[in-house]
Image (cartoon, rainbow, N blue to C red):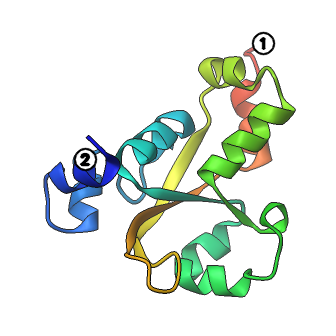
Amino acid sequence: MNNSAAWAALCGTTVREKLESLGIGTGRTFDILVLDETAGRYGIDVFLFFEKDLAHSHTIGEIMDMFRDVSEYERPYINIDAFLRFTRENDPSFAQTMREFPLMVEIVSSGEYQPGTGAKTVPFVTGLMPFLDELDAAGESPE
């Protein structure tokens, strides 16, 4: 089954209802690897944010317009595919680390957007990456 057929087969009529059927809802946390796998299976674009205020205060369309001329790795957000590709290429231990210490992403919003002129709409999810101090605390062992 291709991802558009898989998406169509989900319970619900709205993007929110379909995502809820997958357990993806605003305010929930999701393991980044599971989120990536789910997104690929159902054709969902996932945008990861590094700035809480930006993730909560603008629509994905506004954000894409604001950062249209900024290179991908200099934006305060990144597509999950690019983030995972970059981390895997630059850290050979990434997969093992993610198994030991899952990276949990907070779901901020969801909806549909049009990725290009004339393109059909695509479901999306925005997620907030944990802050560095949260990652440090998760990796610390109790003394």
The front one of 27 and 30 is 30
Could you tell me if residue 130 is visible in this image?
Answer: no
Q: Residue 45: where, in percent of width, then height?
A: 49, 59
Choose top left, top right, bottom left or bottom right for residue 136: top right
Q: Residue 12: where, in percent of width, then height?
A: 14, 59
Alpha-carbon span between mark 1 and mark 2: 47 Å
The circle on residue 6 is 2
Residue at horizontal 23 percent and vertical 51 percent from the top: 5
In the picture, the quarter occupied by the N terminus is top left
The circle on residue 143 is 1
Residue at horizontal 47 percent and vertical 42 percent from the top: 35
For label 2, the SS is helix
Residue at horizontal 69 percent and vertical 50 percent from the top: 82
Q: Amino acid at mark 1?
A: Glu
Q: Residue 132: where, in percent of width, then height?
A: 79, 45
Name above or below for residue 84 compared with residue 94.
below
Name above or below for residue 54 compared with residue 6.
below
Q: Mark 1 near mark 2, Cβ–Cβ under 8 Å?
A: no
Please state the total of marks drawn on the protein image: 2
